[in-house]
Amino acid sequence: MLAKFIRFLGSIKLAVPVLGAIASILIWATFYESKVGSLVVQQQIYKSPWFGALMFLLAVNLGVSTLSRYPWRGPRKVGFALAHLGLIVLIAGSAAVIHLGVEGLLLVRTDQPANHLVRVEGELLEVMDDQGQVQQATVMVAPDYVISPKQFAGLTLLDYDENSVETVEYREGGAQDNSAVRLVLSSDRMDRTFDQWLSPAAETVDLGPAQLELRLAANETALQQLLADPTQKQTHQSGNLLIRVGDRETTIAIEDLRRHDAIINDIQVHLLSVWPDFRLDDHNQPITASQDWRNPALEVSVTQADHQERWFVFAQAEPILAGNESLLDLNWEYQVPPPPATDYFRVVVANQQLYYAARSSKSFSSGPLAMDQMVQPGWADFQITLADWLPHAEVVRNRLPAPPGVEGVPALQIVSTNGHQQWLTWGKSALITDGSYSMMAAFGPRMMALPFGIGLDDFIVERNEGSESVAMWTSQIWIEDLQGEATQQRSVWMNHPTWYQGWKIAQASWNPGDLNQSTLQVKREPLWVTALTWSGALLTVLGIGVMFYGPTLLKKRAAVPEKLTEPIASDPAPMPLATQDR
């Protein structure tokens, strides 16, 4: 019975349906990929367990079929064995390429420094618990909005919207002191009036040349800073670190903490790292996506006697302790000053009262702000009136499909274990509270950090003579290590890539409307994977050659010695004349 089963594994009866199934799947996947994209096809088909099992079954069939013909004597059997062995190696190499190869797109600009963050296919869901542990998952969305995975890190992935806009409503009744104010802006000259809410969720609203702001002042010093004329004193953009030890509050400038440690009572505060634009790479390591102070974060160690703790302090999220429960009575707050603006109207909440600071290019004013009070900020004839104030605002978010002509962003709806539903906007992080347990979640692009940076020196477009049609475009790039010490100059154009440290850098696309920008394709697979695929291809070609041409060559080689060993026929001896006469 076992011998019969083994013969079936290596038989043509199994090979034909397996090959037919694989060929049919590949043909269907080619058309399916044009509709849903390569990532969906790779996740649903090429990387699926069932397709891997089908390819493994084909490899087993080839292997058993080859072993059943042992010993391999003669060119046909030797060629048969080599070709089948090559196909098995090719199957293994293809699987390694699918599961181990990486590639992505890198955007470089002439007016920006070298970039080392590559955008890879798919979206990334990151969840950080209250212990600082980070989990990551690649989110795949099929055309019918079927989301995979369904469950991740205690969250249920409920829905997805590829082009949505967010609407926010405010109402009184929140459990915390979250102030929200509604301002009415009016202009007789422009015949325009509109309302604008400001809240901790939308604390800055850009109006073009001016902006509206809502700020919270934790103490009198912070209040005076927010109400001061910015032309008199400029605060460094790295901000301050507010530390509460028991009943004592201490504010330390980040620039001062960079130069020397701070001592508060008997606690030593040491700044370990600063990330102006905090992100996590594919290895869960903190990095900064840029040098702009968009999402600043700090890594701080505190020491008291023999006890030491390490904290991550964020400007836009709650601080996180790395490790066990804190034994120190510490509270952190990372205060980042608002970006400078030529014109702004700022509402400040302090001690359950409202204040304002209005600045234009010609004037500055500040003071208490009361209900229905009208302020002229100096922007033409605009008038700003405080129409509503909710000291305990509750934010209600609704996500709607973007109207025609309006560009929205993708969003992912998640549900926590206690049934709380929340939308995660693409490219932003959010705090999720599940009872007494809280976590940070972020939904956005998958990024991969390169071990080097690539910058763009120039982007050259060559056009055909006598016309405006494009003949060729070239990216003149420089490649530097992450320390910025070793630099190499390279040129990349279509079908002419360059290689660096095993990475292939090729021209992917360009923007005709912005010649300061270029998009490069960066690709790498392990060297042994490349060697495996090439070896499989060579073995297959060699086996086919031996199988088809080997017998003919052997026959020709065997025929040459036979001709050389045959006796040479001599001319017949002449007959005697007497015999001839007879």
Image (tube, helix red, strand yellow):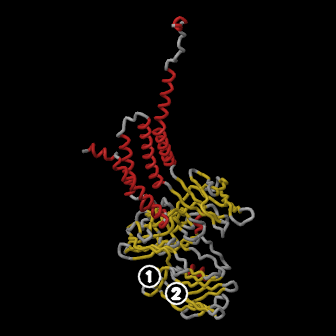
What amino acid is found at the position of numbered circle 2 in the picture? Val
Q: Quarter of the image holding residue 341?
A: bottom right
**Left or right for 464, reference 56:** right
Instruction: Provide residue 179's location: percent of width, then percent of height.
Output: 49, 84
- Labelled pair 2, 1 in contact (Cβ < 8 Å): no
* Residue at point 36%, 43% (across, down): 65
Q: Is residue 382 above or below residue 302?
A: below
Pick whichever, 115 or 559, lies toward us: 559
* Residue at point 42%, 65% (across, down): 131
Outermost residue toward the front in this view: 582
Which residue is denoted by mark 1 in the rendering? 176
The mark total stands at 2
**Left or right for 480, reference 177:** right
Secondary-structure class at tag 2: strand
Query: Reading the chain from its start, which is encountered first: label 2 or label 1?
Result: 1
What amino acid is found at the position of numbered circle 1 in the picture? Gln
Instruction: Provide residue 257's location: percent of width, then percent of height.
Output: 57, 66
Q: Quarter of the image holding residue 337?
A: bottom right
Which residue is denoted by mark 2 in the rendering? 181
* Residue at point 53%, 88% (across, down): 182
Q: Quarter of the image holding residue 338?
A: bottom right
- The quarter of the image holding the N terminus is top left
Outermost residue toward the top in this view: 578
What number is the disc on residue 275? none
Q: Is residue 352 above or below residue 163?
A: below
Q: For mark 2, does the 10 Å Cα neighbourhood hold few (<14), some (14 to 19), or many (20 or more) residues?
A: many
Instruction: Provide residue 206's location: percent of width, then percent of height.
Output: 59, 80
